Image (cartoon, rainbow, N blue to C red):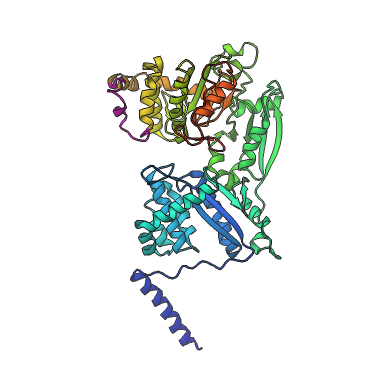
Amino acid sequence: MNVRKVLVVAAFAAGLVAALLLTGCEPPQGGAKKSPDAVKVEFYVMSQCPYGVQVENAVKEVVDKLGPDIDFSLEFIGNKDAKGNLTSMHGPDEVAGGIVQLCAAKYAPAKYMDMIQCQNKNTKEVAKNWEKCAQDARLPVAKIRSCKDGPEGKQLLQASFERAQAKSARGSPTIFIAGKPYSGKRATANFFRAICAEHKGAKKPLACQNIPESPKVNVTYLSDKRCTECNLRGVQGMVSSGVDNPVAKNLDYSDPEGKKLYDEAKLTNLPAAVFDATLDADKEATGNPRFIRGVRQVGQYRVLDQGATWNPICAGEGGCAIEGCGHTAACRQEVPNKLEVFVMSQCPYGVRALDAMDEVLKNFDKKIDFKVNFIANGTAEKGFTALHGQPEVDENIRELCAIKLYEKGYKFMDYVLCRNKEIKSADWEKCTGSNGIDTKKMKACFEGEGKKLHEENIKIANALGIGGSPTWLANNLAKNRFSGIDAETIKSNLCRYNKDLKGCENKLTGGGGPGGGPAPKGGGCGQ
């Protein structure tokens, strides 16, 4: 074929593609034929869950490079309510996001992850941003829209929910590689290694032969030998979940070098992991929302001390008299029949935990000592920050006002339980008035002393190193910490430390009933 004919053919092909696009038609979107040795990989996620988004973004390169050597499927976690409506933890937009992503997977199996990766740049808009992302990825927009708007999309999502339930996948993400649960690190290189290790072919795929080494990250573990309950395994586990190649060093608070690091990194509780700037070079770690959420920057250091409870200053002789030490683990005295919960007011798990407390309080005839504390940061003067933003700060303050005004007989729970039905709604006043909660008093508290109440209350969680919602403490002791979002789990843990408490003999709701079921693996919000 001469040059002239080549140019004519090329021009015709280009014109054909342009014509298809102008008329609303799209190029074919068939997926590559799978190798008989392809490794089956299943991801069960929620479309707006930050941890699900993290693993989707991390695995995309693996899917692209392994091609026919990976049999990848993306499934979604959710339920059907009593009216037959499909539901998901983060609401209707998450349901819509799951539907459109499954439609894209059906009609563009080779390219749908391009659309999802684009959507993941703004997961709050996952129900709406699909079309622009699909167009940019040259997906069949018309087919996806028809699927999304018709019964087919809902059928796809319901079938996906059922597959997730069959695998007992409740937490996002839940991952299976070659049919086996995967609980390793969630970086691209880790997925490559895990999947390539399961490839049974005579010859490993080319993409499995050049997996790059993760960057080295310097980390110092600092503890205190006086603390018999301090266990470095916890913080080491958190580091290993986020950092692939740590270079570790151990120091004790009694060492001059350890004391210096404690002061320079402005630490409060131990044990802690302290990183230098090498952490910033590990893009996989700093792109991991579960890991990086617990890391705070202090000058040249990056500090991870989530869950630490030992304050070496307060633990010294006379230390409990020091201002701010009263809430620390070392200074707490046992109080029988006391139950504390630490929550974020707009955390779905915290909401379910407080809902379950209605049954628990009734079981014990409201004769236990129950306290609600909130998780946030900041001061009344400089402002507050919370995981779910300013609306969560405002609701924390309102609930603290309800607790102050209506503590007797746990009357404040009438407000809390009402708000939990629509916790994201700004219309808090509908949960006052007819139920005996005075609207004017609540408003006056919110606009007056409420911020100070919040400032004092959040000191408790911060002194104990509590960052996960919900976290429970029994009998006022930090060592009696547990998690749970159903009534039976809460009751059983309180009774573990108070065996003669009347009501412990009763069986309460658990395992998915009104109390909400067991806490997800790894805790709740903020973990």
Q: Quadrant of residue 395?
A: top left
Judged left or right of residue 467, residue 311 is right
Foreground of the two, 332 or 322? 332
Foreground of the two, 358 or 213? 358
Residue stretch in magenta: 421-439
Q: Position of residue 83 (x, y in %)?
A: 36, 44
Q: Reply yes or no: does residue 436 show up in magenta.
A: yes
Q: Is residue 471 visible?
A: no
Q: Residue furthest bottom?
A: 2
Judged left or right of residue 199, residue 126 is left
How many marks the image carries: the answer is 0
Foreground of the two, 126 or 502? 502
Foreground of the two, 348 or 512? 512
Residue at figure coordinates x 63%, y 26% from the top left? 270
Q: Reply yes or no: does residue 163 show up in magenta.
A: no
Q: Split into 4 quadrants, where in the image is the C terminus?
A: top right
Q: Position of residue 165 (x, y in %)?
A: 51, 47
Q: Main secondary structure of the magenta part?
A: loop
Residue at figure coordinates x 67%, y 52% from the top left? 213
Q: Position of residue 477 (x, y in %)?
A: 58, 19
